[in-house]
Image (cartoon, rainbow, N blue to C red):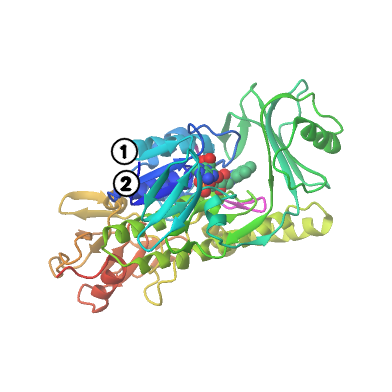
Amino acid sequence: MNERSVAIAGGGPTGLMLAGELALAGVDLAVVERRTNQDLAGARAGGLHARSIEVLDQRGIAERFLAEGQKAQVAAFAGTPLDISDFPTRHPYGLGLWQNHIERLLADWVDELGVTIYRGLEVTGFAQDDDGIEVDLSDGRSLRAKYLVGCDGGRSLVRRAAGIEFAGWDPTTSCLIAEVEATEEPDLGIHADHVGIHSFGRLEYEIRDGEILFKEGGPLRVMVTERQPAKGSEPTLRDLREALVAVYGTDYGIHSPTWISRFTDMTRQASSYRDRRVLLAGDAAHVHAPDGGQGLNTGVQDAVNLGWKLAQVIKGTSPDELLDTYNAERHPVAARVLRMTMAQVALRRQDDRTKAVREAMAEMLGMDEPRRRYAGVMSGLDIRYDLGEGHPLLGLRMPDLDLVTANGPGRMFSLLHDARPVLLNLGEPGRFDITPWGEVQLIDASYEGVWKVPVLGEVAPPEAVLVRPDGHVAWVGDLDDAGLPHALTTWFGPPTR
Ligand SMILES: Cc1cc2nc3c(=O)[nH]c(=O)nc-3n(C[C@H](O)[C@H](O)[C@H](O)COP(=O)(O)OP(=O)(O)OC[C@H]3O[C@@H](n4cnc5c(N)ncnc54)[C@H](O)[C@@H]3O)c2cc1C
């Protein structure tokens, strides 16, 4: 156990995705996870947005998730559905799939990649020095690593021990969620009153024509807004009964809870995602209300941004400063998620004035341009890292083009399965020597279609594109462009000769 290149605290969705990314790059790592197995007490994320499905597709594992979930138009803003079926992506939809299944599938994947997970152990502290970091574990042992990544959730010990500020806003509202049995049958679905939004559902459901149809029988899933926002996180059956009575005048005879939990609209973000050898990702770096279903998606995409950078620094291909681009790129993404989520929580209020704003917003989102813009945000398909001025593709996700290469027809995303960068040349072949950047695959290909990206629409076809392992475009131009060696060096290290 003693020495690894990377230690990951927490094997939730973010930690598992990061572990997979690092393992693909051949990095020696270990995950330390408090839970003794991957089981999850309670319902959390209800699924994936389109960009997360694409990210899994880039690694060749999207089908595993699609086979178990339900494709549906899940993007919405403050209750207004945002249809993305006209977006130019292979996955113009979201996926209904509970977080316990998402975690199980991710855990299977990292297991296939040979990742070591120390289960039933906690990270309890750490000490950094010039050469590495000594990570303390709850069984009294320690683990030495070059870097420690805190993927240990909203109450992150790693973040606190690093002294990283978690600035933001205290809760204004709180909801109880639970899975229970009941002697009376409530009306299934979403209800609203002056206190807020409440719902009853069942674990098993089917989405037909955009409608959720709950399967008969089985435990009830309850969500009820509390009259007074509560901060405590260990609610009881009595709290749930009282909250139900306050809203419905009855507690429906609920009993036998399998779990009861509380979420709030507390909204906070780490002031920095890095302190020397310590990095933060997922809920450890940002928390917010579940409105819009962004948390798990943002964490998984943090991991995909960080994984290849950390791998290159560990291997000595790139200098340590490459890790600073992780904060520079991902901090603004989560800051926007926080803003959009707070706006949706504000619009959840049930007074007449808020209702009027919600209706005005819904009317606006019924127009095509606003619908496309907001759908781009909520689906994650419009995420663009600020890589400077240039071709509109720069910093955006690379589209999954149908290419023809020397190996025959194939998809762009297939070229990313090993998490290696790709220099895609659609011009005349054989005009560039890629060998000084050994990690980068130079692929000569042809593509017949138009270049279209979500929200922006059609863009001018480029001659060559440099695609990072996370699927974002790092450079666009032609192979004679003097900027190409510079971009290769910036992202994939100095030439080796
Ligand atoms: C009601 C609700 C609904 C939600 N709905 C959605 C949704 O629809 N879509 C969406 O994208 N997100 C949703 N979320 C958010 C989503 O659940 C989280 O954003 C997601 O779980 C974050 O993943 P993570 O891996 O960063 O953190 P976590 O899932 O919190 O994982 C952290 C892991 O670290 C472990 N751990 C903690 N401390 C230590 C330690 N010291 N040492 C070792 N291990 C440790 C924990 O056991 C855990 O496994 C919802 C959340 C809630 C509460």
Local SS, label 1? loop
Residue 339 makes an appearance in the image: yes
| Front-lying residue, 334 or 191 | 334
Outermost residue, front side: 140
Q: Position of residue 360 (x, y in %)?
A: 72, 61
What amino acid does circle 1 point to?
Gly
Q: Residues within 10 Å of mark 1 (few under 14, many from 20)?
A: some
When asked about the image quadrant of residue 442, the answer is bottom left
Q: Which mark is residue 23?
A: 2
**Residue at 61%, 37% in the rendered image:** 211
Q: Position of residue 335 (x, y in %)?
A: 57, 63
Q: Position of residue 243 (x, y in %)?
A: 81, 37
Q: Is residue 6 left or right of residue 157?
A: left
Q: Is residue 81 magenta?
A: yes
Q: Would you place residue 263 above or below residue 148 in this image?
A: above
Number of numbered tags placed on the structure image:
2
What amino acid does circle 2 point to?
Ala
Residue 85 makes an appearance in the image: no
The residue stretch that appears in magenta: 70-82
Whether residues under marks 1 and 2 lie with C-beta atoms below 8 angstroms apart, the answer is yes
Q: Is residue 46 left or right of residue 481?
A: right
Q: Is residue 414 left or right of residue 330?
A: left
**Residue at 61%, 35% in the rendered image:** 212
Q: Is residue 463 magenta?
A: no
| Front-lying residue, 256 or 27 | 27
Q: Which mark is residue 419?
A: none
Quadrant containing the C terminus is bottom left
| Front-lying residue, 210 or 105 | 105
Quadrant containing the N terminus is top left
Q: Which mark is residue 114?
A: 1
Q: Residues within 10 Å of mark 2 (few under 14, many from 20)?
A: many
Q: Quadrant of ligand 1?
A: top right
